[in-house]
C-alpha cells in the first residue's frame, strides 16, 4: 500500500492543476461568448430558443459496454482460477493444500463482484431500452 501513495498523490496534484487551467480557459470562453452576444438585440434573448433534439444511440449503450466488460473480466478470472487449481501439482503437505484453497477463495470474491455487477449493468441496459421503446 505504501508503494501506491506517491502514485495517488501525483495523480491528485495533476488533476488539481488540470482543473485550475480548465477553470481559466472556460472563463475566457464565456467572456468571448458574451462579447459576441453584446451586439444582439436583448428582445430576442427573452424568448426561449428551441434547438432540435438529436438522440445518439451510442450514448445509452455505456451500461451494456461496461457490463459486458465486467462480465468478461470476472469470468476470465474465474476460469483462470479453475485452471490454476486443476493444473496444480497436488501437495503432500496439508498446510500447502489449505493455502492453495484459501488463495482461490480470495480470487473468487472480486471476480464474482465483477460478474454480478456486469450482469446488473446489462439488465439496466435492457430496462433502459424497454423504457425508450415505451416512450
Image (spheres, grey):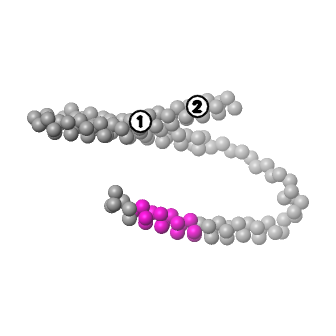
**Marks 1 and 2, the one that precedes in the sequence:** 1
Side (left or right) of 17 relative to 114: right
Give the farthest residue toward the left.
Answer: 92
Q: Where is residue 32 drawn, in percent x and y? A: 72, 69
Residue 64, given in percent of the width and then of the height, sits at 51, 38
Report the residue marked by disc 2.
Answer: 127
Q: Residues within 10 Å of mark 1 (few under 14, many from 20)?
A: many
Magenta residues span 7-21
Q: Residue at x 55, y 35 (%)?
A: 125
Query: Is residue 38 something that shows in the picture?
Result: yes
Residue 46, placed above or below residue 82: below
Residue 28: quadrant of the picture: bottom right
Image spot of residue 11 (x, y percent)? 45, 63
Looking at this view, name the residue that lies furthest to the right.
Answer: 43
Q: Report crowding for label 2: few under 14, some 14 to 19, many 20 or more residues within 10 A (C-alpha).
A: few
Q: Residue at position x 37%, y 40% from top?
A: 110
As helix, strand or loop, the secondary structure at mark 2 comes to helix
Q: Taking 6 as reference, is 39 left or right? A: right
- Left or right of 46 on screen, residue 72: left
Left-right relation of 3 to 126: left
Q: Does the segment drawn in magenta span residue 11?
A: yes
- Secondary structure mainly formed by the magenta segment: helix
Question: Split into 4 quadrants, where in the image is the N terminus?
Answer: bottom left
User: In front here: 5 or 88?
Assistant: 5
Q: Is residue 4 magenta?
A: no
x and y percentages locating residue 38 in the rendered image: 81, 69
The residue positioned 25% from the left and 38% from the top of the image is 102
Say if 83 sits above or below 31 in the image: above
To which residue does mark 1 refer?
115
Amino acid at each position: 500500500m505504501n508503494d501506491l501513495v506517491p502514485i495517488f498523490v501525483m495523480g491528485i496534484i495533476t488533476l488539481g492543476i488540470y482543473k485550475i487551467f480548465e477553470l481559466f480557459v472556460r472563463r475566457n470562453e464565456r467572456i468571448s461568448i458574451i462579447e459576441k452576444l453584446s451586439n444582439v438585440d436583448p428582445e430576442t434573448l427573452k424568448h426561449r430558443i428551441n434547438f432540435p433534439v438529436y438522440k445518439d444511440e451510442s450514448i445509452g449503450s455505456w451500461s451494456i459496454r461496461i457490463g459486458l466488460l465486467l462480465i468478461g473480466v470476472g469470468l476470465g478470472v474465474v476460469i483462470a482460477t479453475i485452471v490454476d487449481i486443476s493444473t496444480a501439482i497436488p501437495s503432500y503437505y496439508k498446510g500447502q493444500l489449505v493455502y492453495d484453497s484459501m488463495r482461490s477463495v480470495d480470487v473468487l470474491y472480486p471476480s464474482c463482484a465483477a460478474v454480478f455487477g456486469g450482469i446488473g449493468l446489462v439488465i439496466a441496459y435492457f430496462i433502459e431500452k424497454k423504457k425508450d421503446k415505451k416512450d
